[in-house]
Image: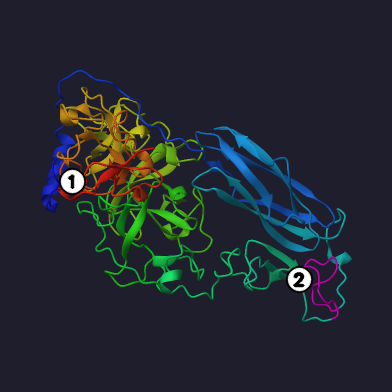
Amino acid sequence: MHTRHHQTPAKRVFLAILWAFLISSTGCGKPKYTSEPLSETAPILSVANSLDFETVLLETTKHLEIKIQNTGNSPLIIRSIYTLNEQRFTLSGITTVQIEPSDEAVATIGFAPSQVGLVTSELIIESNDTNSPTTSVLLRGIGAVPGDDEPISDETCIDVDEDGFGLNCNEGPDCDDEDPTVQAPSPWYADADHDTYGSPLRVEFGCHPPAGYVADDSDCDDTNPDVNIDRPEVGDVLCTDGLDNDCDGEPDSFDTDCTFEDCGEPAYVHTTDVCDPEYPSMGPSICEEYPNSIMPEGYREQCMQICRNRRDCPDGFACYPSRRSLNLHFCAPALGVNLQPDGASCVGDSGCQSAVCHDGSCRGVCTRDADCTGQNEVCYAVVRTHSYIGSEIATGLCVPKPANRLPYGEICTSAIQCESGVCSAAYIDQPARCSKPCGTMSDCPWGDRCAPAIYDNNPNVGYGFRSCGPAPESSYASIGESCYTFGATECRSFFCDSTHPSLLEPYCTGHCDADTDCPMLYPGAHNLKMKCTMGSSMEIAPLIGGYCTPKWCNADADCNGTSCFIFNDAGADGMPKGICQAY
């Protein structure tokens, strides 16, 4: 990698094409050593969104089982599990437990209604799933009379005021059977934070409100009295507290009542991103247009967090495909009511929790196969026109693995032949082969690299779709290791960064979507920290995801618990004083 300088869009296009095709030559030299790629390990808690007991007779109890699965690749620790309404919903069979990868545990929930009507609550599961440390399951059931197995019929209905409601009547019970204007029990909603606004997730029916319940059901956070529909989201404090104070689905800078500094025009494929400067950085982010913004053109763009899938985003957010780069995504609120989960039928993007409706089903975006948790799902590359972009983009979607398609590594002539939807060639003198989407080297088989490649000969979206392919034959160095002798041909990634030759020995870098994708810099020697940076430079293909760079620092306070290794007190090259140590 050479010193960075400004490039025109035309030059960036030329460099991307040149980089994608003209890398068939290899260097010389014997391998010094090899190291296994870092593989990300994490537990993933998978559980049903709701548990429906349907109708249960009063003075009886119905028990249902719910499975808690670990679809990740490290042990899942259930630290706490409980129900919010223990008088109506009881828990048994599980307390604190460790669930191994691909294993499951079973909890038993009992529903014992004390009155007629719908009753709801939540099962709360706290675990070491870093993406969802607290998971809730909606519990619901309907209390019914009579107290035996006889069906309700008009012959047993007692309706004194003849309004259709009464004891054992089909319409339901009557709160005052002598007044025809007073009929069925009303819904009452739990108000745990005592702000007079109730939670729609906890409801009981009755003629009078139970203690701690109110008639309102509009509270989006019943644990915080400062969050409700009448709380204005304005000012420096409320617009930066991370909360959706007015319950409109748009927290902080996403709310139209909050002012924020526009980051400029949306970042397209061949533009440098202002949101992720080399230093400092709190993690990879991009300048994108907020899809749900009602602001005028030119006031919709803000820096937003990179995501691989919806689990990387806060609750209530979706992971949206970006126009800036192929198979790159960002977090933003998903607005709407009754949003459908992945796999459910849909007619448009706005009806899905994932904000993507593809071929009639809600589908989550993905960067790699590991992002997909459904049974027999793969990360499948598609070219589609997203509703809020209005132009063709390429992204990965979690879909059931197509039958009768070519597997990874087979020679292909079209993406439709391949089970992952990618037919690509990273080298001009080799045939195209079925590949698969990737975000970083560890997503690929050992010996292959994650790099931009020509996608299915499509000139609009073809240059830069990150997919797995063979590494240079002479390569031996992993990301973070030195490539001082022979340059890029030493690197399994084929990326050698020499941006600051007076400060740093050239090192192998590679693609990433998160800081955790990046290993140590100069492992075994200095053991320095790297982070994921979104940007472009002369040898890195323009904005094809991020790439690993040193985590620069001026003091220990910049390093989140580790020390700042100082070696540039004079600030040469305009850079900070040092790089954070890994530990």
Per the image, label 2 sits on a secondary structure element best described as loop
The quarter holding residue 425 reads: top left
**Can you give x and y, in whole percent of width and height, for residue 580 in the image?**
32, 43
Mark 1–mark 2 Cα distance, whole angstroms, equals 67 Å
Q: Can residue 544 be seen in the rendering of this structure?
A: no
Name above or below for residue 100 compared with residue 531. above
The earlier-in-sequence mark between 1 and 2 is 2
Amino acid at the residue labelled 2: Pro
Q: Is residue 23 left or right of residue 250?
A: left
Position of residue 46 in the picture relative to residue 334 (left or right): right
Q: Is residue 145 visible?
A: yes
* Residue at the spot of label 1: 537
Is label 1 in contact with label 2 (beta carbons under 8 Å)? no
Where does the magenta region start and end?
161-178
Q: Which mark is residue 185?
A: 2
177 inside magenta stretch: yes
Local crowd size for mark 1, using a 10 Å CA cut-off: few (<14), some (14–19), many (≥20): some
Q: Position of residue 462 (x, y in %)?
A: 23, 43
In the displayed structure image, the side of residue 258 where residue 525 appears, left or right = left
Query: Within the magenta stretch, is there residue 350?
Result: no
Question: Residue 318 lies in what quarter of the image?
Answer: bottom left
